[in-house]
């Protein structure tokens, strides 16, 4: 999968998964939920990349994304729906998202 | 390299990605510097990346275009601009070119020697145009091995920007031409070349320096070979190298004055391929900032012939003059030594040694690189100290005619310019003061001083008592102007101290009260003799000044008398000097004498054929001063000034006749240097002669009942202060709030009666005593001349005793017979009193002898 695209502001190659352009700081993408999976979209809501979330040995559904506040803004909190119907909150470092994209994996372990 | 976001902790180096950049990413306000990256996760923390960190070096090429370089790896298939970070990140930078280190270096380096005959070679062999490729941050941390001789080669290791390892190189030592039998670097060293930097001060803020590259006999042909251009340039901490090529007239040295920052590096380049860069400061040199909120007080006694400066920390009693030393920092070359250096042409380096026993006296003279005509045809406004001129130094034997290059006597004649136009005089005064303050402050702040490095310098100064209010304002303006420029050069806050005082008063600050009686400070300088008379009691800590005067009759008069100078060119008295001697050479000779020297025995300076003429002129010189002092003391007795003082300070109404009066005579100044007058023997003789004359005057005052007053005059030395330093040191003392007694004038005017009384109005007739106490085997016969009412002209000279025979006036000047009428007219009383004090002792003598004898006009 193509992981690079051009930043519409500085026209430099950006990496899908970066929320902001590393060169000029333009807002490039957001993380959303679609069918229990994570979906990376551009700022026009066009989907760019989707991947499943795995907890332990099995995939889990993501029910909510809570933006982190305070110092740990490099992470987001995810509410996962477990098999027994309970909800578990975990932290997902954004670098794991970027690494998953760069490395071409479609599953993120949390 | 650190690309971790300070806000979210995201580390870009962990990303297995490639960042693409080009030259434009690193521009900021036109200067290549750093690129600021954005955190791709939070956009809150800034990630900065510099070309240095990438190992890429920006340089400006000949067309002012910025080009990017990367060191050539030497092997492999690497591509310029492909850089691997310490993590997983990689960079691709466009338009980067490879650069070979060897292209930056000279092919061979020169070798010099220090005073212990050890090699001194360039710190780095890099060409100046590539100097900015050195990694200065690492060099400041000591990450380098300066150049050294290893066997027959030169070796150095140094860090280059963008290169992790130190670069080491081994080069040849250049072959000099004075020794063709090259067997080792020893044979190649420029053995007698010198590189110096003045001054060796450790102040961070100091901005005035002088760099000089000097060749000796061995190295001159190579160092300044006209067939092989030698380039020299210096560089400050920032900016590029600036070439310099000011050359001394003998072609032996090249120098530059820098007044806006400290030179750190110097390059010397021979032809195209030889040279190197020298560090001008040692690795361990620590520059310090001046101590905040501290003040150094600087007392400046700018004399007519000589100047002296004292320093003291404000609020502390300790103060002293500063022996002027050689403050040259020697990067290579022999030791300066104490031997007298002969110079065939004017070298305008700062004085390396002061004059006098303590080395703390400097001539009030400007030594001009070009001839005196330089001033007449232009302006001194833009002369730069130690580039265009200097102050003459002790320890130098000029092989050129000093009279062609020395400008002096610019302290006086402010109103009419004297020898110079008013504009030139102002400029000369300022230029001299600039050089003086620079030299003195540099000495006070020199590297090894233990003085506190005060951030503020209060400059206090004195002025001659003859100066009018307008004259004093003129002087103050000069100080204000000069302290502004010198403050800029030194980085210190220079202020002109409050309330300047006259020179005698300043000298009087040194001694607290002594015995009951009078104390007279006599400061004889080169231009004026300043006299202050104090009444004092042992119990009263604040002596009262009852009289103060300043006459333009001092050491300069004696010099001109010995040389035979006259204001009127038609009147040419003989010179007592050897034919090749001049005023300037005599002054230098006198200044170089130890205090106990007998200058008159030096037949290379004085013409022995004119010994008697010389003796007579010296007699007149001191006889005249003796008369002035005697009149002052006698006037104080006749006027009962000491008794009135006692009455005031003791609040006593009792007033009796004075039975005795103690007079302490404090003889100061450099003008006394001629006749050893300040040693204990001669001081005592002066006191004796003076006592005799005072008693003689008092006996003549009929009806005053003063005949039996015992006058005890003693000469009092200033403990621990040599005569020339008294004014400068006195300026540092807390200004005493002295009571000034009744102002009494006309006590020291030649030929005029002195009016001393306010009630009975008694007068003292003017007399001249010609005494011979100061020379070995001299006569000791007082000669009283007839007073001016005697109109009988007598060619045998009235009053002169016939045994032992004294010389007739014609011996003073063989031309006397022909120029008699002019002398007579010059000696007649002048309505301009001050003018009479400009005459030589010979003229003064003539004035007294002839003015009395010649009928007045219309008589």
Image (cartoon, rainbow, N blue to C red):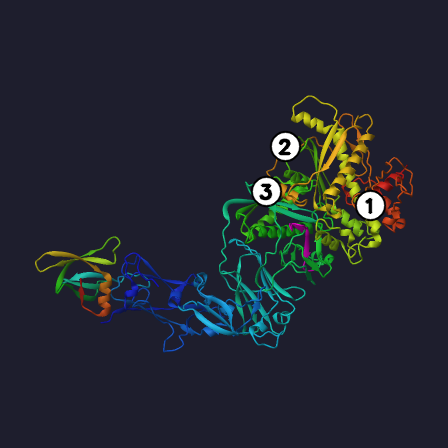
Please say if B104 is above or below B618. below
Label 1 element class: loop
Task: Give the image quarter of residue B392.
Answer: bottom right
The answer to whether tags 3 and 1 share a subunit is: yes
The mark nearer the N terminus, 2 or 1, is 2
Q: Position of residue B495 (x, y in %)?
A: 57, 45
Q: Nearer the viewer, mark 2 or mark 3?
A: 2
Is residue A19 shown above or below B575? below
Q: Nearer the viewer, residue B387 or B562?
A: B562
Q: Where in the figure is residue B91, as x and y percent of width and height?
A: 34, 69
Q: Give the mark nearest the N terminus, 2 or 3.
A: 3
Tag nearer the camera, 2 or 1:
1
x, y percentage for residue A87?
12, 56
Asked if residue B97 lies left or right of residue B10, the reply is right
- Quadrant placement of the N terminus of chain B: bottom left
Q: Nearer the viewer, residue B470 or B837?
A: B837
* Label 2 – label 3 distance at C-alpha: 23 Å
- Identify residue for label 3: B497
Circles 3 and 1: CB atoms closer than 8 Å = no
Chain ID, mark 1: B
Dot label at residue A75 = none
In the figure, residue B245 lies in which quadrant? bottom right
Q: Indicate which disc residue B778 carries.
A: 1
Q: Which residue is mark 2?
A: B542
The answer to whether residue B52 of the structure is visible from this angle is: yes
- The magenta segment: B356-370
Q: Position of residue B224 (x, y in %)?
A: 62, 70
Q: Is residue B369 magenta?
A: yes
Q: Is residue B741 left or right of residue B48?
A: right
Cα separation, mark 3 vs mark 1, equals 47 Å
Check if residue B262 falls in the magenta segment: no
């Amino acid at each position: 999968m193509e992981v690079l695209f051009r930043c519409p502001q500085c026209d430099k190659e950006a990496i899908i998964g970066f929320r902001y352009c590393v060169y000029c700081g333009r807002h490039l993408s957001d993380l959303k939920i679609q069918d229990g999976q994570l979906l990376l979209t551009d700022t026009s809501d066009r989907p760019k990349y989707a991947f499943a979330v795995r907890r332990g040995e099995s995939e889990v559904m993501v029910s909510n994304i809570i933006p982190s506040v305070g110092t740990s803004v490099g992470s987001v909190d995810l509410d996962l729906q477990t098999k027994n119907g309970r909800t578990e909150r975990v932290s997902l470092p954004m670098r794991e998202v970027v690494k998953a994209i760069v490395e071409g994996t479609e599953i993120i372990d949390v | 390299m650190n690309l971790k976001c300070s806000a979210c902790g995201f580390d870009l180096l962990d990303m297995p990605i490639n960042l693409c950049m080009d030259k434009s990413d690193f521009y900021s306000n036109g200067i290549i510097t750093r690129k600021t990256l954005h955190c791709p996760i939070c956009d809150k923390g800034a990630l900065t990346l510099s070309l240095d960190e990438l190992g890429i070096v920006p340089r400006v090429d000949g067309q002012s275009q910025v080009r990017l370089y990367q060191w050539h790896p030497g092997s492999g298939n690497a591509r310029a601009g492909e850089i691997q970070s310490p993590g997983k990140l990689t960079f691709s930078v466009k338009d980067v070119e490879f650069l070979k280190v060897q292209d930056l270096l000279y092919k061979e380096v020169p070798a010099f020697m220090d005073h212990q005959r050890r090699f001194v070679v360039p710190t780095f062999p890099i060409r100046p145009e590539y100097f900015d490729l050195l990694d200065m941050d690492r060099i400041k941390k000591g990450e380098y091995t300066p150049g050294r001789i290893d066997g027959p080669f030169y070796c150095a290791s140094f860090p280059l920007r963008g290169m992790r390892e130190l670069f080491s190189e081994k080069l040849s030592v250049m072959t000099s031409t004075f020794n063709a039998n090259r067997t080792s670097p020893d044979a190649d060293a420029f053995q007698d070349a010198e590189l110096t930097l003045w001054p060796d001060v450790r102040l961070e803020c100091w901005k005035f320096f002088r760099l000089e590259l000097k060749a000796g006999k061995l190295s001159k042909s190579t160092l300044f070979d006209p067939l092989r251009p030698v380039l020299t340039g210096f560089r400050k901490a920032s900016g590029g190298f600036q070439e310099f090529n000011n050359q001394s007239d003998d072609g032996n040295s090249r120098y530059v004055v820098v007044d806006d920052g400290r030179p750190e590096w110097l390059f010397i380049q021979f032809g195209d391929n030889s040279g190197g860069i020298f560090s001008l400061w040692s690795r361990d040199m620590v520059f310090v900032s001046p101590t905040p909120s501290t003040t150094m007080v600087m007392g400046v006694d700018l004399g007519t012939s000589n100047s002296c400066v004292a320093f003291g920390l404000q609020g502390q009693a300790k103060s002293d003059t500063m022996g002027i030393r050689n403050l040259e920092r020697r990067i290579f070359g022999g030791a300066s030594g104490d031997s007298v250096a002969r110079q065939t042409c004017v070298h305008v380096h700062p004085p390396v040694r002061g004059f006098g026993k303590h080395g703390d006296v400097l001539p009030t003279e400007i030594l001009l690189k070009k001839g005196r005509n330089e001033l007449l045809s232009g302006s001194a406004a833009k002369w730069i100290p130690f580039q265009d001129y200097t102050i003459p130094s002790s320890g130098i034997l000029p092989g050129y005619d000093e009279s062609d290059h020395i400008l002096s006597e610019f302290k006086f004649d402010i109103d009419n310019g004297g020898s110079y136009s008013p504009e030139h005089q102002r400029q000369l005064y300022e230029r001299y003061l600039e050089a003086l303050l620079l030299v003195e402050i540099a000495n006070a702040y020199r590297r090894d001083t233990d003085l506190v490095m005060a951030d503020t310098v209060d400059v206090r100064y004195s002025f001659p008592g003859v100066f009018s209010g307008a004259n004093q304002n003129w002087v103050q303006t000069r100080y204000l102007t000069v302290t502004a420029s010198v403050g800029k050069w030194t980085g210190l806050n220079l202020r002109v101290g409050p309330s300047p005082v006259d020179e005698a008063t300043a000298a009087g600050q040194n001694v607290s009260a002594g015995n009951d009686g009078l104390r007279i400070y006599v400061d004889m300088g080169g231009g004026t003799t300043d006299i202050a008379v104090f009444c004092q009691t042992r119990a009263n800590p604040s002596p009262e000044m009852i009289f103060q005067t300043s006459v333009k009759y001092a050491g300069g008069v004696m010099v001109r008398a010995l040389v035979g100078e006259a204001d009127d060119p038609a009147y040419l008295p003989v010179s007592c000097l050897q034919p090749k001697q001049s005023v300037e050479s005599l002054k230098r000779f006198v200044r170089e004498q130890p205090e106990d020297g007998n200058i008159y025995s030096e037949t290379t300076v004085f013409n022995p054929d004119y010994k008697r003429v010389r003796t007579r002129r010296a007699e007149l010189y001191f006889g005249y001063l003796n008369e002035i002092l005697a009149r002052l003391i006698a006037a104080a007795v006749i006027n009962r000034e000491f008794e009135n003082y006692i009455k005031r300070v003791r609040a006593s109404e009792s007033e009796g006749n004075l039975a005795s009066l103690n007079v302490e005579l404090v003889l100061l100044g450099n003008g006394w240097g001629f006749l050893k007058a300040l040693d204990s023997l001669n001081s005592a003789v002066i006191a004796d002669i003076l006592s005799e004359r005072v008693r003689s005057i008092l006996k003549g005052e009929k009806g005053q009942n003063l005949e039996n007053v015992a006058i005890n005059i003693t000469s009092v030395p200033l403990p621990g202060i040599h005569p020339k330093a008294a004014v400068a040191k006195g300026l540092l003392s807390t200004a005493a709030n002295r009571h000034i007694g009744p102002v009494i004038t006309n006590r020291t005017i030649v030929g005029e009666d002195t009016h001393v009384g306010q009630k009975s109005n008694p007068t003292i007739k003017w007399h001249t005593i010609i005494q011979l106490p100061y020379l070995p085997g001299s006569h000791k016969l007082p000669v009283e001349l007839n007073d001016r009412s005697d109109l009988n002209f007598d060619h045998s000279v009235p009053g002169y005793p016939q045994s032992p025979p004294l010389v007739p006036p014609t011996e003073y000047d063989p031309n006397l017979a022909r120029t008699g009428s002019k002398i007579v007219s010059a000696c007649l009383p002048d309505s301009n009193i001050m003018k009479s004090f400009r005459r030589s002792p010979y003229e003064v003598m003539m004035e007294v002898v002839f003015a009395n004898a010649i009928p007045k006009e219309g008589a």
